Amino acid sequence: MAKVILKKKIDVQTTPLSEVKSYARKIWLAGLGAYAKVGSEGSEYFKELVKSGQHVESKGKKVVVEQLDAANSQIDQVKSNVSGVRSLVEVQLDKVEKAFDTRVASALNRIGIASKHDVETLSAKLEELTALLERVARKH
């Protein structure tokens, strides 16, 4: 009797190897689909990103300009305040200087030293007397 060896027919659809092949094919197709989608929609997405970037940039510039204007306004106010304070200081310094001059002149006068005004008055009188003497000397 001849032995008949029957080989069991293996179902290709149900083996783990076929499942891996099927899954790998799906991954491959998903990659191709993503590539195709990026190719067709990628330029539009890039344009959207550029547009969004321009919008953000313009907002940023506006904020910077507003902050710069506010800072310049504060600087102008400080300059104005400094000018006011400077003029007040100058007035006070003038008062102090006049008071100092008056006190020094008074102290010099008390010890018998003539003031600038006294010297100028005497010089003017001396010039008048010199001129008068010269006229009298010419007549004689």
Image (cartoon, rainbow, N blue to C red):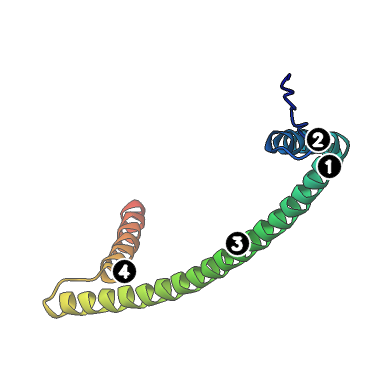
Q: Categorize mark 4 by other alpha carbons within 10 Å: few (<14), some (14-19), many (20+).
A: few
Name the amino acid type tagged 2. Leu
Residue at 86% across, 42% down: 44
Which residue is disc 1 drawn over?
Answer: 47
Which residue is disc 2 drawn over?
Answer: 29
**Disc 4 to disc 1, C-alpha distance:** 92 Å
Q: 36 or 82, which is in the foreground? A: 36
Between marks 2 and 1 in the image, the one whose residue lies nearer the viewer = 2
Name the amino acid type tagged 1. Lys
Q: Quadrant of residue 109?
A: bottom left
Which residue is disc 4 drawn over?
Answer: 121
Looking at the image, residue 31 sits to the left or right of residue 117; the answer is right
Residue at 33% across, 64% down: 124
Q: 136 or 94, which is in the foreground? A: 94
SS assignment at label 4: helix
Which residue is disc 3 drawn over?
Answer: 72
